[in-house]
Amino acid sequence: MIIEKQEDVTEAVLGEMHRTPDARTKELLAALVKHVHAFVRETRMTEQEFQAAIGHINAIGQHTTPSHNEAMLLAGALGVSNLICLLNNGSHGTRPTQANNLGPFFRDGAPPCRNGDSLVRSETPGPRLEFHGRVEDANGRPIAGAEVEVWHSSPIGLYENQDPSQAEMNLRGRFTTEVDGSFSFRSVKPAGYPVPTDGPAGTLLAAQKRHNMRPAHLHFLITKPGYKTIASQVYDAADPHLETDSQFGVTRALIADFSAERVEFTFVLEQGESWRPKPPISAKATASA
Ligand SMILES: [Fe+2]
């Protein structure tokens, strides 16, 4: 259509939606156009601001590498990751859930382990941690044979993929729950850590005068056919950044006492689709990266 006035632009773009064969794609794109156009109108975005916004969006891609996922980091910093998680878990957002953000550091290929094994694959000084987990269904019955992938930062706050001094897959492992739903591993205590600030996520935090810390946590991905897959994170109750997580991930259901060497925690899986999230990264950083 020929555009006569500013309101026509929205109508013209929405008018092209009827060609979209997939109904869900059509719904998502139409809502995106409506909200983006409304955002531009509400904020009276200037041409200079629009140019700057395009620069930020391009920089998301430019900062993404096989060992770093800037879009995932930014989604967390805007609270979108946890909102999506909470809307899609816990009986569609009506109940507490152990589901949490996958985060930007999940990698495929964690080595298979036996329960009780250590995740430490190269010298990693720090306080020891023993984790005893249990996976159960919504009625408290144990789920045997669930696959539990674990990953976490080192006691100085670096994941192996960020730190060439750590062995490949250090502090990562894959476990299977026993008949009673239990799994366990030994490791070192993770530290809270600063998220990278050299890309658009850092620009966002600086503009708001926000810090870039995450409270200390352990990551989990739990899968079992017949149950809805959950990514989870378990947070250290004593961490000073629990209330101000730069990724807005901390929920009441995910706080545990890390003060003793032994941590115990129960994960509940809902019935549903077992699926495997796409790993946000595929490689470890090299010394020169
Ligand atoms: Fe993390």
Image (cartoon, rainbow, N blue to C red):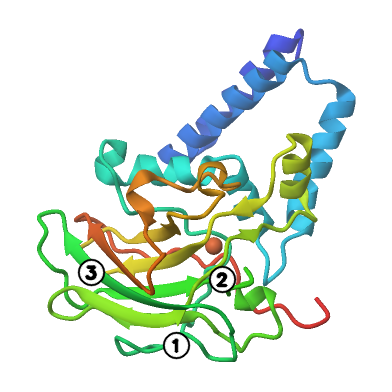
The foreground one among 199 and 261 is 261
Residue at the far front in the pictured view: 260
- Observer-nearest residue: 35 or 14? 35
C-alpha span from label 2 to label 1? 16 Å
Q: Is mark 1 on a helix, strand or loop?
A: loop
Of the two numbered discs 1 and 3 on the same chain, state the one appearing first in sequence. 1
Q: Which amino acid does label 2 sit on?
A: Ser
Work out which quarter of the rendered image holds the N terminus and state it. Answer: top right
- Residue 250 in the image, given as x and y percentages of width and height: 45, 47
Residue highlighted by disc 3:
134
CA gap between label 2 and label 3 equals 22 Å
Q: Mark 1 points at which residue?
A: 111
Q: Which residue is pictured at 71% across the width and 21% down the height?
A: 40
**Residue 192, quarter of picture:** bottom right
Q: In which quarter of the image is ligand 1?
A: bottom right
Q: Residue 171 carries which label?
A: none
Nearer to us of marks 2 and 1 is 2
Q: How crowded is mark 3: few (under 14 residues within 10 Å), some or many (20 or more)?
A: many
Residue 110, position as x, y percentages in the image: 47, 82
Q: Where is residue 157 in the image (x, y as percent from the top left)?
A: 62, 68
Q: Does the residue labelled 2 lie within 8 Å of ligand 1?
A: yes
**Observer-nearest of 64 and 208:** 208
Q: Which residue is under mark 2?
A: 153
The amino acid on which the numbered mark 1 sits, given as a three-letter code, is Pro
